[in-house]
Image: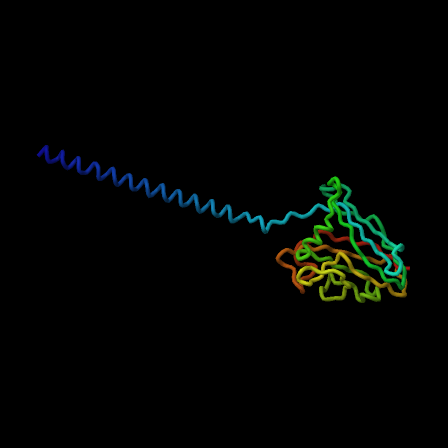
């Protein structure tokens, strides 16, 4: 009988050990699988192709050039006084245009925290498919375009001279013809929208993120 019990003991012991080892192996595999799942989720959460860090813009200059006289230039500036600080771009100048003239409006957009300054306007042009400048002004301040701009309604008339790769407007160059009536202390607003994976022929001034919105005082005399 003792011999029989010893044999049973030896037979049971390996069986129990093998079972425990298998359970441990299953638990380890389960833990590794869970770890891989969490790791995968973390990778999926960070997609560099869809990250957007807003450009630092310290200086914006609007340049109105008379199409009949290249020496007739009107400039209006905005500047961020503290760079990366809490303050926003501040208007420095008033836009003073003449009646019954046609101007081409272009922009100088810079980050002057860099040395030399970083031309953000050139970057916007390179990424034209992701940007558009919208405008708002006093109703019928201009003969062409008529109306009050396209910030409230993207389909309203603006004379864009440039376009992106999909032939949608950009706005770094536009044309403006003033009327015969004088305007005092009017307003002229420009809004730059950043619209990655959003911009189409019908997207408006509320689609995407606003890089800047500047409202200048405008006189037409």
For this view, does 116 lie left or right of residue 178? Answer: left
Question: Percent x, y for residue 116?
Answer: 75, 41
Question: Percent x, y for residue 35?
Answer: 43, 43
Quarter of the image for residue 6 reads top left
Question: Percent x, y for residue 161?
Answer: 76, 61
For this view, does 21 lie left or right of residue 189? Answer: left
For this view, does 84 lie left or right of residue 41? Answer: right
Image quarter in which the C terminus is found: bottom right
For residue 55, above or below residue 206: above
Numbered label tally: 0
Residue in view at x 73 percent, y 41 percent:
114
For this view, does 170 lie left or right of residue 144? Answer: left
Quarter of the image for residue 148 reads bottom right
Question: Percent x, y for residue 131?
Answer: 69, 56
Quarter of the image for residue 187 reads bottom right
Q: Residue 56 versus residue 2: which sits nearer the camera?
A: 56
Q: Residue 163 versus residue 155: which sits nearer the camera?
A: 163
Render colour scheme: rainbow
Q: Residue 123 versus residue 187: which sits nearer the camera?
A: 123
Q: Is residue 184 visible?
A: no
For residue 219, above or below residue 116: below
Image quarter in which the N terminus is found: top left
For residue 164, above or below residue 23: below
For residue 172, above or below residue 15: below
Q: Is residue 104 visible?
A: yes
């Amino acid at each position: 009988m003792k011999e029989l019990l010893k044999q049973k003991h030896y037979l049971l012991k390996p069986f129990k050990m093998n079972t425990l080892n298998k359970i441990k192996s299953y638990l380890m595999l389960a833990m590794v699988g869970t770890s891989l799942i969490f790791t995968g989720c973390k990778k999926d959460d960070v997609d560099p192709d869809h990250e957007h860090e807003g450009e630092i813009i310290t200086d914006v200059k609007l340049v109105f050039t008379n199409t009949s006289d290249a020496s007739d230039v009107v400039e209006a500036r905005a500047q961020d006084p503290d760079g990366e600080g809490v303050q926003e771009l501040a208007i420095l100048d008033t836009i003073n245009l003449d009646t019954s003239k046609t101007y081409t409006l272009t922009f100088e957009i810079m980050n002057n925290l860099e040395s030399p300054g970083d031309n953000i306007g050139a970057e916007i042009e390179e990424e034209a498919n992701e940007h558009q400048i919208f405008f708002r002004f006093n109703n019928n301040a201009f003969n062409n375009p008529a109306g009050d701009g396209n910030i409230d309604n993207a389909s309203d008339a603006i004379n864009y001279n440039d376009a992106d790769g999909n032939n949608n407007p950009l706005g770094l160059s536009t044309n403006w013809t003033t009327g015969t009536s004088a305007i005092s202390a009017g307003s002229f607003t420009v809004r730059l929208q950043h619209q990655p994976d959003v911009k189409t022929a019908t997207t408006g001034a509320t689609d995407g993120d606003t890089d800047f919105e500047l409202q200048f005082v405008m006189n037409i005399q």
